[in-house]
Amino acid sequence: MTARIGIGLVGAGRMGSIHARLIAGAVPEAQLVGIADLRLDAARRLADEVGGPPVFDSIDELLARTPCDAVLIAVASNGHLDAIRAAAGAGKGILCEKPLALTLADTDAAIRVAGAAGTRLQVGFMRRWDPDYLRAKARLGSGEYGRPLLFKSLQFDTEPPPPNYADPGVSGGIMVDMGIHEFDLARWLMADEVVEVHAFGSSLAHPALATVGDVDSAVVNLRFAGGATGTVELARNTTYGEDVRTEVLATAGSVWVGRLPLTHGASSSGGVGGTAGSIASDTVDPRVPRFEMGYLEQTRAFVRVIADDRPVAVTGADGRAALAIALAAARSMDEGRPVSVGGIP
Amino acid sequence: MTARIGIGLVGAGRMGSIHARLIAGAVPEAQLVGIADLRLDAARRLADEVGGPPVFDSIDELLARTPCDAVLIAVASNGHLDAIRAAAGAGKGILCEKPLALTLADTDAAIRVAGAAGTRLQVGFMRRWDPDYLRAKARLGSGEYGRPLLFKSLQFDTEPPPPNYADPGVSGGIMVDMGIHEFDLARWLMADEVVEVHAFGSSLAHPALATVGDVDSAVVNLRFAGGATGTVELARNTTYGEDVRTEVLATAGSVWVGRLPLTHGASSSGGVGGTAGSIASDTVDPRVPRFEMGYLEQTRAFVRVIADDRPVAVTGADGRAALAIALAAARSMDEGRPVSVGGIP
Amino acid sequence: MTARIGIGLVGAGRMGSIHARLIAGAVPEAQLVGIADLRLDAARRLADEVGGPPVFDSIDELLARTPCDAVLIAVASNGHLDAIRAAAGAGKGILCEKPLALTLADTDAAIRVAGAAGTRLQVGFMRRWDPDYLRAKARLGSGEYGRPLLFKSLQFDTEPPPPNYADPGVSGGIMVDMGIHEFDLARWLMADEVVEVHAFGSSLAHPALATVGDVDSAVVNLRFAGGATGTVELARNTTYGEDVRTEVLATAGSVWVGRLPLTHGASSSGGVGGTAGSIASDTVDPRVPRFEMGYLEQTRAFVRVIADDRPVAVTGADGRAALAIALAAARSMDEGRPVSVGGIP
Amino acid sequence: MTARIGIGLVGAGRMGSIHARLIAGAVPEAQLVGIADLRLDAARRLADEVGGPPVFDSIDELLARTPCDAVLIAVASNGHLDAIRAAAGAGKGILCEKPLALTLADTDAAIRVAGAAGTRLQVGFMRRWDPDYLRAKARLGSGEYGRPLLFKSLQFDTEPPPPNYADPGVSGGIMVDMGIHEFDLARWLMADEVVEVHAFGSSLAHPALATVGDVDSAVVNLRFAGGATGTVELARNTTYGEDVRTEVLATAGSVWVGRLPLTHGASSSGGVGGTAGSIASDTVDPRVPRFEMGYLEQTRAFVRVIADDRPVAVTGADGRAALAIALAAARSMDEGRPVSVGGIP
């Protein structure tokens, strides 16, 4: 076997753990060479699970003490820029969870420091690596489906953000934290730019979110440069599991990704008594990551990029463009009017 | 409009009512010219519903007093032969519910009298006229799916037969009453003959059926002349609606007809609590006939056959062949051994 | 049997034909006593199909020459008000296809003339009578699903309107012609009023629609008085059949109505070759009406209302409210801003 | 972290690789301490992928040179007994892939040597550990579904066995190699014993199998001691992916596990032209293991059993009972008659 790419993981929380387990179990071409987290015990617990790499209480310690080729950033969103600065300063390849930063200015700074350091910066839009989404993209790109007319995408979670993540100053709020995935898909699948958005939001399910300026559900209208339209729906309280569904209606066909999150199990009991009954389909445990394959392929692609010294597929500019849409949608909710994406500072 | 084909309906029970409503509402090329039933009040109620044709207390009265082109026979199975005799004697075209009769000898008699009278005799295998089954047949016939290897078909009802129909001397028992549809499909879809069967049965759900020599569920293995195999399952007690599913696995493809009987409605409620929930899909009310379109197209085809003086598509010989399989399956259950279809007297 | 309610049908086009066949075939408590259409040959053809009621070249002729209890209006939308005036003037009960009229002023006039004549006026929102929608409504009304948060509904047709219906001056345009169903569902299922809407539209699939001021696809954001949000999507060009899907996410559950319009048939052929294949599910022929049961129950309910002298369930006020939302959505598309429903003249 | 259970893997082929990757990536409580395979290069490639444990060319070498707590046996079926003998001789816990052996005599020998050595012997019926099957079992055990009446299970693979596995002397043939999973499920889900079977088979898809005395598809009727019936279908040539579906119809309900192997992706293209189209659902790549979670939970349960010194859940006796049914089914195919399971030598 050729030498493995050494990856330092920054952040041992929920996302960091997903990444660490996948790298250890399913990316033989990479090796987890260190885990950094201010909460050293969390880093240690995760390290124990994935073969015992050394742990550090900061990205700086990790960079100083462990030889590595690349860094995977999975800390809270408001800490991304600092981590990118440190990693770029050390000349490491960077795979950063979305969003790169919470403002366009910080995003530009992140892109700039990576560019100046001549290092690779890939954004963690893992759905682009999911096999179902890849097939949808290939279909739309084949020409066989005609011209895309209408984009639909929804993301319904089962729960509000955890307390330490409820502050939009940390998470970016629903549009940036959740919606950015749909906005990236909108650009990618439609092969077009979103130029104007309109959004309504509400916090009827989790009124506490209103006190920090966030909402728990929202609907967003999209207008694309080429004239097509789109809609995005976000919510935080399904009873049936995590729900992600995307659909593109084109002039000569349609593609769908996602369906209600069903397992292979179902049952029916109780009497019929002359009237119709029902069949209950079990839904996927919301703790099971829907996009495991996406995370995996994303990391594999990143590792190959580092190993082969090639450009990344999902760039800082992609991260910036999706963030601009998210910020425009958030502003539209606030101001009660359609907002031009180009006008976001 | 050209003259309509006049149809006399014999039998105003469940099946007769389905046919009468469909003819009145959706077969403009035919006209219901009379309804005969020993239970004259049932005939009258049905006549009131479908535009008020005259009613009679026997097929003989109907044939004597109302000019008609054809007769649709929907009385209990053990009355089919007498009705066929009467209709053939009067030179009328005949559409007879399955089975033509409860024994091969009576079936042969039915075919003979129709043949001697030079009248048309079509058997009511309505699934052959269902659009989904027709597409499956066309696919298998196209050659694109290769050679059929394995036939699977099930029919699960929600209830045991009604008391007046529980006697196998009236209904023919589960293999003849229910299974004959699957056995006809087996021959038709596989374009092959069933040469040997083996069956197990049980009456655990409705033990009363055992007292009359019938069962409430059964499994049947089929062996085809060309070497393929098949399986049929029958039962009488689902909690979720009427279930009919058929599947053919071929060397280069598969076709499916039927799925769990779901409506367009579903719901989920109650908390998730960190674990997976479920989505309950409403099932079709078992009183809604699944094969309405099949009954309709069957009658339309029969009417065209009468009008155009052409041969029927589903012949007495088809009825005889399916009955032979059903009788062989019933005998296999009784005798605990595989039974050759050709050996049924 | 008690006396039947006599219904005069006005309009022998696509919708009129659906109603006529259902009344003749499945509403024994009503009788079709006449069909009026300026195109007398269309009226005659339809009459032939449904038992031969007399035909007339105008609603006035029908009212003058045939005793009837009620009138079912199924002419083009821009002719509804005149027909309502005639029927109300003759004191007949009225079941009118949606929309009552193309403007709020004309709708108010329609409601006024019916009110002044003391006659019943029911609007043809047939989805309210569909069993799946009725179950969804009952579920949301049960309290078990908590508070509704987010309403989603889409209607995708397979084709643009026929040439004689493409003029928004005749049909009302996409928001009135198609969207009004979703807007009525929004009010009914959410048990709340829509107060503000925002819409984007496009005519990329059928550019000819742009020349008459209409679009072929649109997305609409809804804001409800109680704070909830919603989204409606409309389009006119699916390749897979007619698609209607509605969903309500509530604080303690979700309800769904509709799914991709699949039949019971599916197939797979061709080689796998080590990679995944696909299973093609047949979709419903778009000419088969999805809401036959809704139309039927709607008419039955109307007939009972007339027979029992009770108030209608779906009132002129319901028709007006849904139209106001549709007009606000159309204006939002035109003016590029959110529009308050209350501000529509 | 407490000490890990050391596992030696015997067999680096397809099944061994699945196990190795899962242990390395997702069973932190175990450690892969060695891989033995006569094909040393295969062992080495697999070891490289999973963190580099030492490799050996035989189980004896592995046992002699690496301290381990347990052995996982994943060699060809005809090699199981020898490996069990070696592992039991060394006093190691044993998790053995199904079947334990190809004859009841060898199975009895395997159970005897493990018993004499006082070591644990668990059989690899991984479906018993799949979450969907576990829910089905729990439902049927709850009493809410009444008495099980009819068992249905099918397993359709995409391909015939690889050349080195086509010999029934190596694999056991279709009933033992594939069917044993269904026969185990039959006993487990029905909580009853199969007493008699009848089977038909054919080799129309892969005639080469006939030359070695095997078939490529088969149907099996089951009769249970308590009177219930069942059916099992096996085949080797789907075009749409690997298909495993199980269903139990009980007196007061039904449970389903499995459905057509669909992903989250679908598409439709091409014109409708007034007729129905279709929606193509992508199916799962057959190389993706359907029962990954089952394998994982199976190994975790085994590791806990070893760590806690408790009895195994799926015993040698379970392996023997399922094998007896498989052998009876194979004999039924050969001899053309129903075969009593108790009569298998």
Image: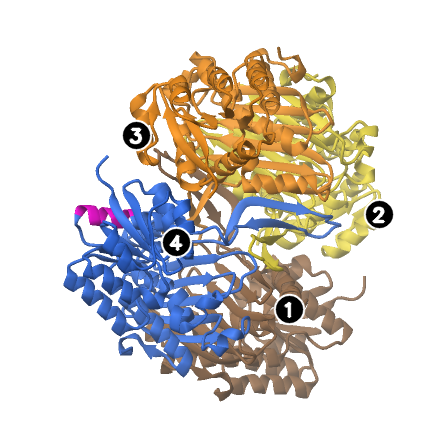
Chain colours: A blue, B yellow, C brown, D orange
Disc 2: host chain: B
Q: Amino acid at mark 1?
A: Gly
Give the percent coordinates (x, y) of residue A205.
55, 70
Name the side, left or right, on which C92 lies relative to C12. right
Q: Which residue is mark 3?
A: D45
Disc 1: which residue: C34
> What kind of residue is marked 4?
Ala
Q: Are marks 1 and 3 in contact (CB under 8 Å)?
A: no
Q: Within 10 angstroms of label 1, few (less than 14), some, or many (20 or more) residues?
A: many
Dot 4: within a 10 Å radius of its alpha carbon, few (fewer than 14), some, or many (20 or more) residues?
many
- Residue D306 has which mark? none
Mark 1 vs mark 3, CA separation in Å = 83 Å
Nearer the camera: disc 4 or disc 1: 4
Look at label 2 and name its amino acid: Leu
User: The N terminus of chain C lies in which quarter of the figure?
Assistant: bottom right
Which is closer to the viewer, label 3 or label 4?
4
What chain does badge 3 belong to? D
Chain ID for label 1?
Answer: C
Q: Label 4, label 2: how many angstroms apart (C-alpha)?
A: 85 Å
State the mark number for residue B40: 2
> In the image, is D161 to the left or to the right of A106?
right
What's under tag 3, amino acid-wise? Answer: Arg
Which segment did they paint magenta? A300-308
Magenta includes C50? Answer: no
Q: Secondary structure at mark 3?
A: helix
Real-space Cα distance between discs 1 and 2? 32 Å
